[in-house]
Image (cartoon, rainbow, N blue to C red):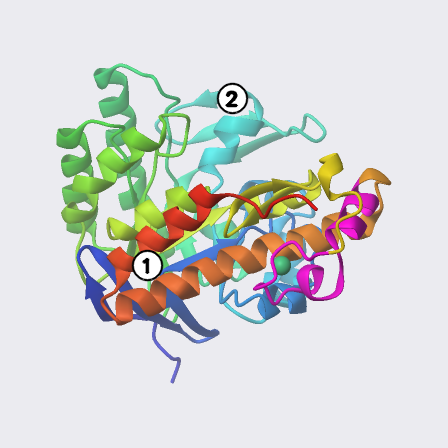
Amino acid sequence: MVKKFQFELLATDGAARHGLISTPRGDIRTPAFMPVGTAATVKAMMPESVRDTGADILLGNTYHLMLRPGAERIDRLGGLHRFMNWARPILTDSGGFQVMSLAGLRKLTEAGVTFKSHIDGSKHELTPERSMEIQRLLGSNIVMCFDECPALPASDEAVAESMRLSMRWAARSKEAFGDRPGHALFGIMQGGVTPELREESAAALRDIGFDGYAIGGLAVGEGQEAMFGVLDYACGFLPEDRPRYLMGVGKPDDIVGAVKRGVDMMDCVLPSRSGRTGQVFTRRGVVNIKNARHSEDPRPLDEQCRCPACRNYSRAYLHHVFRAQEMISGMLLTWHNLQYYQDLMAGMRDAIAEKQFAAWEAAFHQTRVEGDIEPI
Ligand SMILES: [Zn+2]
């Protein structure tokens, strides 16, 4: 018998939640941060190293994988898990958001979206049905509904119209997904920053019924205050017994604020992308490794971090390899950033379990305010 997809709420502290998602490919401890493996790789990382940081699940991008190397090819090669050597759970997005942000010359109709590839200009179509098919071919464990995300700012009428289209697509996604034991389908709430539209969207999704619910249409330039404002009420529109996923978030303080408001899952390219540009996330805030103050500093980035960049290398070395544009720079800094994010999530899970989230959060902000260690 196939193991089911299940979510168990283990502890709450205020609105913050700690839980466990069980899947046939392993458990996901929540709150969970999902590193982004856009093109079947978390850039600059071996999958074993991603796991070593404490990641339980990765995110894969339907848009990128359908264009290159193609979903049918990945299926013939045994699915995405085998292809990229990651045996644990994978969540795939629907492709909708990246068609909007990356593809050229889009045409949106009730049926779906036709667009030109940003790689070679070839023409493609994504519909709810095709998105479900691609995510099935990839072997995704958590499949996302195909939706449309309007660019903000937009008028209330435009946001409402787009949200209602996404809800019709959510029903078609559910129909096309069918009955797949052990696999989950998440609906995506839209509605911009308008409470009535968020409520209408959540009600439509609950009527259809999903294994989990994402909060979409945020982290698109509305700012942290507006995002937290939506989360303050939007989480309450969603069922308590299903995981809640905030897509594309975010900076460490965004993540802490989202967990505080009842979010269970997040993903973001920030820790891996920043690792390649010399931006380092630490307990004491952001450190810019290319800064000259690190050039003769024999100390680790963070003496409390257990990642190889901090255990085995000095700030001076990390500064040098970044300046010299050596590949190990992106490798070490990405590893550190992903370790920092996973340790952040682990800290919040423990704090929620012990009902100490408020104290944990105060310490998190206080350490960041104190800033980086004094220069040598
Ligand atoms: Zn580290």
Q: Quadrant of ligand 1?
A: bottom right
Above/below status of 209 relative to 102: below
Does residue 361 appear left or right of residue 134 in this picture?
left
Above/below status of 225 relative to 242: above
What percent of the width, then of the height, locates residue 287?
Answer: 61, 42
Amino acid found under the numbered disc labelled 1: Trp
Above/below status of 310 relative to 337: below
What percent of the width, then of the height, locates residue 349?
Answer: 35, 66
Amino acid found under the numbered disc labelled 2: Arg
**Residue at (65% x, 54% y) in the render:** 301
- Nearer the observer, 57 or 162: 57
Please state which of the two labelled residues, at mark 1 or mark 2, is closer to the viewer: 1
Packing grade of label 2 (10 A; few <14, some 14-19, many >=20) is: some
Residue at the spot of label 2: 106
Which of the labelled discs sits on residue 60, or is there none?
none
Q: Please indicate, yes or no, whether residue 40 appears anywhere in the rendered image.
A: no
**Residue at (46% x, 29% y) in the render:** 113
Packing grade of label 1 (10 A; few <14, some 14-19, many >=20) is: some
Q: Is 6 part of what is drawn in magenta? A: no
Q: Secondary structure at mark 2?
A: strand
Instruction: Determine the CA span between mark 1 and mark 2.
Output: 45 Å
What segment is highlighted magenta in the picture? 299-322
Q: Please indicate, yes or no, whether residue 225 appears anywhere in the rendered image.
A: yes
Which of the labelled discs sits on residue 360, or is there none?
1
Q: Is 305 part of what is drawn in magenta? A: yes
Residue found farthest to the bottom: 1
What percent of the width, then of the height, locates residue 111?
Answer: 38, 31
**Residue at (36% x, 49% y) in the render:** 256
Q: Earlier in the sequence, mark 1 or mark 2?
A: 2
**Residue at (59% x, 68% y) in the render:** 51
